[in-house]
Amino acid sequence: MSASLALSVDHGFTAVQAAFARPGSATPSFPQSGVNGPVRHFAADSEIYAEGDDANCFFKVVSGVVRTCKFLSDGRRQIDAFYVSGDVFGFETGAEHRLSAEAVSDCVLTPYRRRGFEMLAGRDDRVAGQLFSYAMRCLERAQEHSLLLGRRSAAQKLANFLLEMADRRSGGKVVDLAMTRQDIADYLGLTIETVSRTLSQFERDGVISLPSARRVCLENQGALRQLNS
Amino acid sequence: MSASLALSVDHGFTAVQAAFARPGSATPSFPQSGVNGPVRHFAADSEIYAEGDDANCFFKVVSGVVRTCKFLSDGRRQIDAFYVSGDVFGFETGAEHRLSAEAVSDCVLTPYRRRGFEMLAGRDDRVAGQLFSYAMRCLERAQEHSLLLGRRSAAQKLANFLLEMADRRSGGKVVDLAMTRQDIADYLGLTIETVSRTLSQFERDGVISLPSARRVCLENQGALRQLNS
DNA sequence: CGTGTAGTTGAGATGCGTCAATAGTTGTGG
DNA sequence: CCACAACTATTGACGCATCTCAACTACACG
C-alpha cells in the first residue's frame, strides 16, 4: 500500500473528509464490494446491538439518529455519543461491543461485516485510511465529551450541546432535536429536570426560543458560545 | 499489504497487545527504522507540547508519567489521560495538537516523526495495525473516562481511579502515585479538597491505608470494586 | 530554622439531584 | 370531534453532595 494510510492529511483522507463535510448525503463512501449488507431499518428506541454482543459488524448511518450507551447497575444510563447520517459507529478491536447502540429515531443503517472489511482494508489503503479516520473522529469526540462532563456547569453543558447539534445539522438557527430530555440528560450527565430548567432559563434570557419541546431556535448564538468558551 | 491491518484480532495486533500487557517493558515495539528520534528527557511539570502546536510528532513513554490536558478560560484544567511506560500519545489527524501534554514526573520519551511514520506505515502493515490499535486503545479509555465523569459520585470516581492505577502498575496492592492531588482532581472532575476528604474517608473505612500522601495501599480491593460496579 | 509547596480538615454556601405535582403532546377508540 | 390514556416535559420545594473559602499540618529544601 502507499503512504496514504494513517496520518496523511494531504491525501487518502480527502474522500473521508468530504463524506463528513456532507453528512446529509447518503452516498456510501465505502466501496460496494460485498462487505456491506443491504440497509437495515430500525424503529425508534429499538436496540441495534447490546453491550457484550459479538462485534461482527459495524454500521454507517444513512438516515435517523443513533445513540451508544452504557447502563449502570442502578439502571441509570450514560450516553456516549449520538450519530447522525454519514457517521460510522460500532467498530471494536475486541470481540465484543463495549457499548450498546439504540435507535433514537426511526433510522436506516448500512451494516459492514467486520471480517470482509478487514480483507478489503488489506487490499485497498484508502479504505483502511477511512476507517482510521472514523476511529480518530470518534476519539476526538470522546475527548471533547470528557472535557465537557468534567468541568462544566449545567448551563455550559447545554450551550455546548445545542451548538454541537446546530453545527452537525447544517448549521441553521433552528435545531430539531431527535432525542428526548432523558437522552440529553444522559448524554450530559444531568437529570431531565435540570435540562428542562436550564433550557427554560435560556428562553427567559432570550438566548433561545422553544416553539415546541423538540424544536430549539438559537436566538443568540454568541451568548451560547460565550458560555461555552 | 495483507489482511492484518485494522480490525484483525488474530494477527497483527498480537505484538501490540503484548506491548500493552507489559507496560513496564521499555522495549519499543515500533521498528527503529529512522522514524523515531533519540529519546528525549523532560523534567517534572515541563511542557512536552502545547494545545495548538504543530502535530509533527507523537511519543511513546519509555519511563515516567505524562498527562494530556486542556485549559479553560478560567484557568481550570481537565486532564484527559495519564500515560505510563509503553503508552503512546499525541497522534492527530489534524495539523495541530488538540490537547497539551506535560510531564507529571521526570520522564523519558521516544519521539516519532509523523511524516516518516506514515511512510513506514505505508510499507509495513504491522506498523499501521499497531498505530490503529493505539488509537483504539485511546478511544476505549476516553469512553470509559466519559462514563466515569458523567454519572458517578466522588467515591466511585476515586475507587475507579485507584483500581486503574493499580492495574496499570503491575497490579500490586501498593500504588505509588506520580501525580498530585490537583492532578487527580483535574482528571476526575473534582476539587483537591474532595479528593483528599474521600481518600481520608476510605482510610477511616479501612479500604485503603496511606503510608504517605503519594503512596496508597489497597487494603480491601473488593470494597473498591463494589463501589465501582 | 525558616520558607514554600502539598495535603488535610472544617464550616458554610450552592448547584444540582430528588421527589412530587402539574401541564402539554400524541395516539387510540368511541 | 371529543375523551381518555400514556408518555413527555415543566415547575416547585427541599435535601444533599460537592464546591468555596479558610485555617492548619506535614514535608522538602535551602
Image (cartoon, coloured by chain):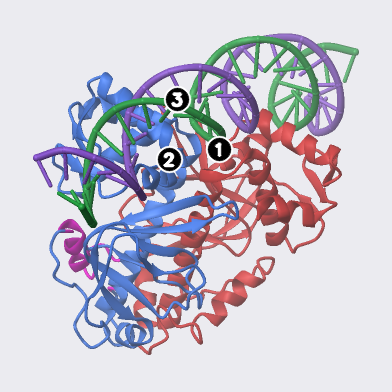
Chain colours: A blue, B red, C green, D purple
Dot 2 surroundings within 10 Å: few (below 14), some, or many (20 or more)?
A: many
Q: Is residue A152 left or right of residue D9?
A: right
Residue denoted by label 1: B189
Q: Tag on residue B74? A: 3
Image quadrant where residue A221 sits = top left
Q: Is residue A201 left or right of residue A11?
A: right
Of residues A99 and A196, which is closer to you in this image?
A196
> Which chain is mark 3 on?
B
> What type is the residue that disc 2 sits on?
Leu
Whether B56 is among the magenta residues is no
Dots 2 and 1: beta carbons under 8 Å? no
- Helix, strand or loop for disc 1: loop
Q: Are marks 3 and 2 on the same chain?
A: no
Residue denoted by label 2: A148
- Helix, strand or loop for disc 3: loop
- How far across and how far down the image is residue B130, in percent? 47, 74
Q: Earlier in the sequence, mark 1 or mark 3?
A: 3
Q: Residue at x 27, y 73 (%)?
A: A4
Image quadrant where residue B209 sits = top right
- Labels 1, 3: front one: 1
Residue B43 at least partly seen:
yes
User: Is B145 located above or below residue A4 in the figure?
Assistant: above
Q: Which range of residues does the magenta coloring cover? A: A4-23
- How far across and how far down the image is residue A227, in percent? 34, 27
Cα–Cα gap, marks 1 and 3 = 15 Å
> What type is the residue that disc 3 sits on?
Asp
Residue A6 at least partly seen:
no
Cα–Cα gap, marks 2 and 1 = 10 Å
- How far across and how far down the image is residue B114, in percent? 38, 63
